[in-house]
Amino acid sequence: MTVEPPARAPRADARRNRDRLLEAAAQVVAEQGAQASLRDVARRAEVGLGTLYRHFPNREALLEALLGRRFEQLAERAREFERQAEPEQALVDWLREFSAGAAAHQGLPETLMATLHDPASPLHASCTAMREAGAGLLAAAQRAGRIRPDVTGADLFALANAVGWMSGLAPALAERREHLFALVVDGLRTPGGRAAGEPPSGAGTD
C-alpha cells in the first residue's frame, strides 16, 4: 500500500506573498470594483503577475479568497466590539464597518455569489459565521431595549448592504454615506431611543 506523504505547509515567504496580494486586492477592488486589474493588484503587492497566478489561478479565486477574508475579519470585529462597547454602540460600530465594505464587492460573479448558499463551500461557512456574529450584536442591543424587537438579522444585512450599494453608485451619494447610514440606524432604534454614545436626557443639568 502506498502512503501519501503529508502535505507541506506553505513556506513563510509564500504566506507573506499571499497576504500581500490579499491586502493589495482589497485596496484595488475598493478603487476599481470586482473587475479590478489583476496586473494592478500584483503591482500594488510588489510581486510578479506569475506569483499572483500561482496563488490565485483566476480572478474568481482571488475574489473568493478576498471575500472569505473579509467575512472572517468582520466576525472577529463583532467579537471585539462586543467586548469593548455597550450593546447599541457595538452594533452601530460594526454595521458601519460592514456597510463601508459592501460597496467594494458590487459586481461579483454570479458563480461566486452562488457559493454563499452552498453548505459545502468554505465561503458559505465564513459568511454564516459573520452573519451569526452580527446577529449576536443585534440580539444584545435588542435585549438592552435599544433596537426595535421586530428587526431581524435579514433586515439588518439588507439595510447595511443597501447603504453600501447606494453610496457606490455616484460620488455625490458616496459623500452622503454617513448621513444615509445614520438614517438607517435611526430607523432601527426603539421609538424615542437616543443615539449611541449620547448622554441620557437631562444629564449634566441641575
Image: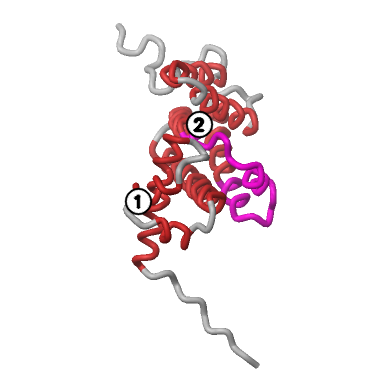
Q: Residues within 10 Å of mark 1 (few under 14, many from 20)?
A: many
Label number found at residue 103: 2
Q: Magenta segment: does it hold 110?
A: yes
Q: Secondary structure at mark 2?
A: helix
Q: Nearer the viewer, residue 47 or 91?
A: 47
Label number found at residue 45: 1
Q: Amino acid at mark 2?
A: Ala
Q: Amino acid at mark 1?
A: Ala
Q: Magenta segment: does it hold 115?
A: yes
Q: Using the rendered image of the protein, determine whether residue 59 is visible from the camera's viewpoint.
A: yes
Q: Do the numbered discs 1 and 2 sit on residues whose CB atoms are within 8 Å?
A: no
Examine the rendered structure and indicate whether residue 126 appears above or below residue 131: below
Residue 151: percent from left, percent from top? 63, 26
Residue 123: percent from left, percent from top? 59, 51
**Side of 114 relative to 59 (left or right):** right
Examine the rendered structure and indicate whether residue 105 appears above or below residue 181: below
Magenta stretch, main secondary structure class = helix
Residue 25: percent from left, percent from top? 43, 46
Residue at the (38%, 47%) spot, across then down: 24
Q: Secondary structure at mark 1?
A: helix
Work out which residue is located at the far top of the displayed protein and give it. Answer: 206
Label number found at residue 186: none
**Side of 10 relative to 188 (left or right):** left
The magenta-colored residue range is: 101-129
- State the image quarter where residue 1 is shown: bottom right
Examine the rendered structure and indicate whether residue 51 appears above or below residue 35: below
- Give the Cα separation between the discs numbered 1 and 2: 22 Å
Residue at the (62%, 90%) spot, across then down: 2
Residue at the (37%, 57%) spot, across then down: 48
Q: Nearer the viewer, residue 189 or 76?
A: 76
Residue 43: percent from left, percent from top? 35, 49
